[in-house]
Amino acid sequence: MRNNKTIIIGSNGQLGTDLLRCFPDDVVGLTHADLEIANANDVVALMRRVRPSLVLNTAAFLQDRGEVTVVNDEFVTPTWTLSLARQVRRLCDDDSVRYGVVHASSGGQCSWYEFTEEIFRLTGTTSRLKPMSVTASAVDIRRPRYSVLDNRALKDAGADVMERWQDALAGYLKSIES
Ligand SMILES: NC(=O)c1ccc[n+]([C@@H]2O[C@H](COP(=O)([O-])OP(=O)(O)OC[C@H]3O[C@@H](n4cnc5c(N)ncnc54)[C@H](OP(=O)(O)O)[C@@H]3O)[C@@H](O)[C@H]2O)c1
């Protein structure tokens, strides 16, 4: 006979945690330590034992992806929205820059590959990272090869409070730590 039991696999992950909140009744939450979904025998045994009517599998393999290929000949300055918001606030709080077009982005520059490399370093991601040319990419998005701009107006006015992109990235990653 069927029951109303729900199984949530990966229950301590981001999605699994929120699903647990939305399926509070008659639910079995399973972490990676409870169940390895690559082990077919364990999965079958579990299904026979629990006989769920619904299985929500949120197991993600983000850390285990063998190789990540990222464009290494397009250069940008990654900018955290919170840094930009602080800079806008600073501009509004004094009148060091009174008019004109003001550009504000983080300091420095990197390729998308270098950006990913830094994310991997800061998050301890161990996937292999491989550089590729944008000309070899299957994604047909036209972007400038070099979109780095200087915060000249802010610097001239002594009002540039944007941090290096590496520091902004570290700040962002810290802000999303649970
Ligand atoms: N986060 C989002 O905003 C979002 C939005 C839409 C869709 N999604 C999708 O939802 C899925 C889950 O994402 P998420 O952000 O919740 O990921 P997550 O936070 O990394 O959670 C994934 C969970 O799966 C577990 N897991 C990994 N490999 C497993 C395995 N072989 N057997 C059993 N459990 C395993 C992980 O445990 P360990 O960490 O202990 O290995 C972790 O608890 C992904 O497919 C993602 O693309 C996510």
Image (cartoon, rainbow, N blue to C red):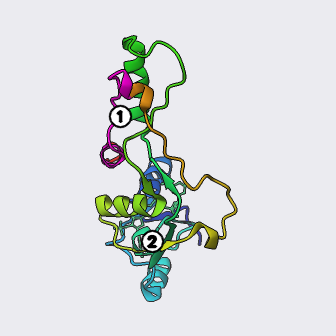
The stretch in magenta equals 155-173
From the image, state whether disc 2 or disc 1 is nearer to you: 1
Check residue 158 for magenta coloring: yes
Quick one: which residue is furthest to the bottom in this view?
41
Mark 1, residue position = 162
- Secondary structure at badge 2 equals loop
Residue 166 location in percent, x, y?
32, 49
Amino acid type for the residue under numbered disc 1: Met
Characterize the local packing of mark 1: few (<14), some (14-19) or many (20 or more) Cα atoms within 10 angstroms.
Answer: many
Callout count: 2
Q: Is residue 78 visible?
A: yes
Characterize the local packing of mark 2: few (<14), some (14-19) or many (20 or more) Cα atoms within 10 angstroms.
Answer: few
Query: In this view of the protein, which residue sits in the foreground, 92 or 40?
Result: 92
Query: In this view of the protein, which residue sits in the foreground, 20 or 130?
Result: 130
Residue 141 location in percent, x, y?
67, 57
Is residue 78 placed above or below 48 in the rendered structure? above
Q: Are marks 2 and 1 in contact (CB under 8 Å)?
A: no
- Image quarter of residue 150: top left
Q: Quadrant of ligand 1?
A: bottom left
**Mark 1 residue CB less than 8 A from any atom of ligand 1:** no
Check residue 39 for magenta coloring: no
- Secondary structure at badge 1 equals loop
**Mark 2 residue CB less than 8 A from any atom of ligand 1:** yes
Residue 170 location in percent, x, y?
30, 48
Mark 2, residue position = 61
Residue at position x 44%, y 26% from top?
153
- Give the spatial CA distance, label 2 vs label 1: 35 Å
Is residue 53 placed above or below 47 in the rendered structure? above
Amino acid type for the residue under numbered disc 2: Phe
Is residue 59 placed above or below 119 in the rendered structure? below
Q: Is residue 71 left or right of residue 118?
A: right
- Image quarter of residue 121: bottom left
